[in-house]
Amino acid sequence: MTFVVTDACVRCKYTDCVEVCPVDCFYEGENMLVINPDECIDCGVCEPECPAEAIHPESEELLKWVEINREYASQWPVLTKKKDAPADADAFLGQEGKFEKYFSPNPGSGD
């Protein structure tokens, strides 16, 4: 089992979770983070750190997100250090359907 980042992260991209990850399995896109499901050790320390509540344990309902996380973790740079959230992050907290509206497949800058 793994943890996955869902669309609640899109446009919020808080990085509190990155700071506590013991295996550095977060990868940075332009406007969201993903977890490499093949590197995640299922420790769960990242989940409570996410202000957007975007991190969840793998489940049948979230299989689409496991694949999205896997796909973009292979394309984006690793992120191991906390960064400032986007200036407008709080304005996007709690919005529904952010992946379809705002997702960017472009990589972030990483470390």
Image: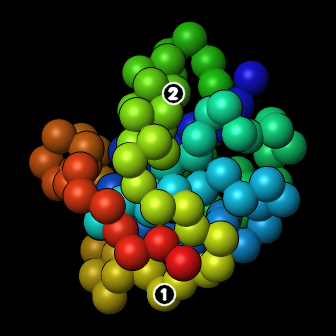
What percent of the width, then of the height, locates residue 5?
A: 52, 44
Q: Indicate the amino acid at tag 2.
A: Val
Query: How dense is the environment of label 2, judged by Cα within 10 Å: few (below 14), some, or many (20 and up)?
Result: many
Query: How dense is the environment of label 1, judged by Cα within 10 Å: few (below 14), some, or many (20 and up)?
Result: few
What percent of the width, then of the height, locates residue 32?
A: 38, 59
Q: Is residue 88 visible?
A: yes
Tell me: residue 1, above or below residue 68. above
Query: Residue at point 41% right, 55% down?
Result: 76
What residue does disc 1 label? 84
**Which residue is farthest left?**
101
What residue does disc 2 label? 66
**Which residue is farthest top?**
60
Q: Is residue 94 left or right of residue 56?
A: left
Query: Residue at point 66% right, 64% down?
Result: 17
Q: Is residue 106 left or right of residue 83?
A: left
Between disc 1 and disc 2, whose residue precedes?
A: 2
SS for tag 1?
Answer: loop
What percent of the width, then of the height, locates residue 96?
A: 28, 45
- Spatial CA distance of label 1 from label 2 is 25 Å
Query: Residue at point 66% right, 32% down?
Result: 38
Along the viewing direction, whichever of 106 and 50 lies nearer the viewer: 106
Q: Indicate the amino acid at tag 1.
A: Asp
What percent of the width, then of the height, locates residue 102?
A: 17, 54
The answer to whether marks 1 and 2 mark residues whose Cβ atoms lie closer than 8 Å is no
Query: Residue at point 44% right, 25% down?
Result: 67
Image quarter hosting the N terminus: top right
Along the viewing direction, whichever of 108 and 32 lies nearer the viewer: 108
